[in-house]
Amino acid sequence: MNLRLPPVRPGKLAMLGVSGALLAVLWHLGLADGPLLARGARNIGVFAQDLVPPDTSVLQTVAGAMVETIEIAFAGTMLGFAGALPLALAANDTVSGRPVAAAVRTFLALVRTIPALLWAIVFVVAVGLGAGAGVLGLAMYSMGYMGKLFADAFDDIDPEVVEAVRGVGVGRLQLARFAILPEAANAVLAQTLFVFEYNVRASSILGFVGAGGIGFYLLGYVQSLQYDALMMAILVTFAAVVVIDQASVRIRRRFLSVASHTSARS
C-alpha cells in the first residue's frame, strides 16, 4: 500500500523558512538565552515600578521643552517642504527630462540615506548646540524623504490629464503648475502632515546630541536615574503626538471635502 504525503504548499514552506531564519537570528543575537531573558524581565519590572507615579514637579519644564520640540519639527518640516517640492518636480521625467530626473532622484536618495539624528550631529558641528541644529537636521532629512514621496505622487498622476494639458501647447513649468501640482495636491498635503507627525517624534531625541528639544531632558533623566521625571516627559510627549495626530486628521478631512466639492462644481 502506497502512502501519499500531502503536498507542501509554497506558502507553508516559505513560512517555515522565515521562522527558521528568525530563530537562527535570535540565537545569534543572544536573544534565545533563557536566563538572560528572565533577568531582563525582572529588570523591566523594577524599571516600571520606578516610573510611577510621574514626577509632576517637572511638568512645566518638560512642557516648555515639548513646545520647543514642536517648533523644531514644524520649522524643519516646512524648510524640508520648501526644498522637496521643486526637487520632486525636477525628479519627474515629464517636467525635466529623464537624465535630469534620474540625477535628482539619486541626490534625494543620498540625502534621505543619512538619518535625521546624524544630520543633527553634522549641524551641531556646523552651527553649534541648540535648536538651530535640530531644525536644519530635520530639514535635510525631510527634504530627501518628502522629495521621494512627492516625486512618486507626481508619477502616479493620470497620464491623460497631463497629455490633455500638454495638448494646449503649454511649457514644462505651466504643465507642472496647471496639471501636476493640482492633481497631486491631496497627496502632497497628506504626506507633509505625515512627515510633520514623524518629525515631532524624531525631534524628541535630537536633544540627545545637543540639538534642542525635550530629548535633552529625556537623556538627562535616564542618566540621573530619575525615572519618575522620565515618565512625566514621556506622557507629555505622548499627549503632544496624540493632539497633533488628531489635528492632522481633521485638516486632511476638511481639505479633502473642500477639494471634492470644488471638483464637483467644476
Image (spheres, rainbow, N blue to C red):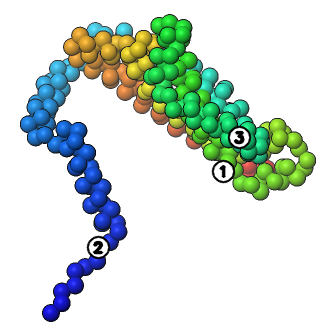
Q: Earlier in the sequence, mark 1 or mark 2?
A: 2
Q: Position of residue 44 (x, y in %)?
A: 16, 29
Residue situated in front as seen by the camera: 9 or 250: 9
The residue depicted at 38 percent of the width and 26 percent of the height is 239
The type of residue carrying mark 1 is: Asp
Q: What is the number of the mark on residue 101?
A: 3
Residue situated in front as seen by the camera: 85 or 15: 15
The type of residue carrying mark 2 is: Val
The residues tagged by marks 2 and 3 sit, at their Cα atoms, a distance apart of 46 Å
Q: Secondary structure at mark 2?
A: loop
Residue situated in front as seen by the camera: 188 or 12: 12
Q: Which residue in the rendered view is the most extreme toward the top?
A: 128
Is the residue 136 above or below the residue 17 in the image? above
Is the residue 133 above or below the residue 114 in the image? above
Badge 1 is on which residue? 156
Q: What is the number of the mark on residue 8?
A: 2
Q: Earlier in the sequence, mark 2 or mark 3?
A: 2
Report the quarter where the N terminus lies.
Answer: bottom left
Q: Earlier in the sequence, mark 3 or mark 1?
A: 3
The residues tagged by marks 3 and 1 sit, at their Cα atoms, a distance apart of 15 Å
Q: Secondary structure at mark 3?
A: helix
The residue depicted at 73 percent of the width and 38 percent of the height is 100
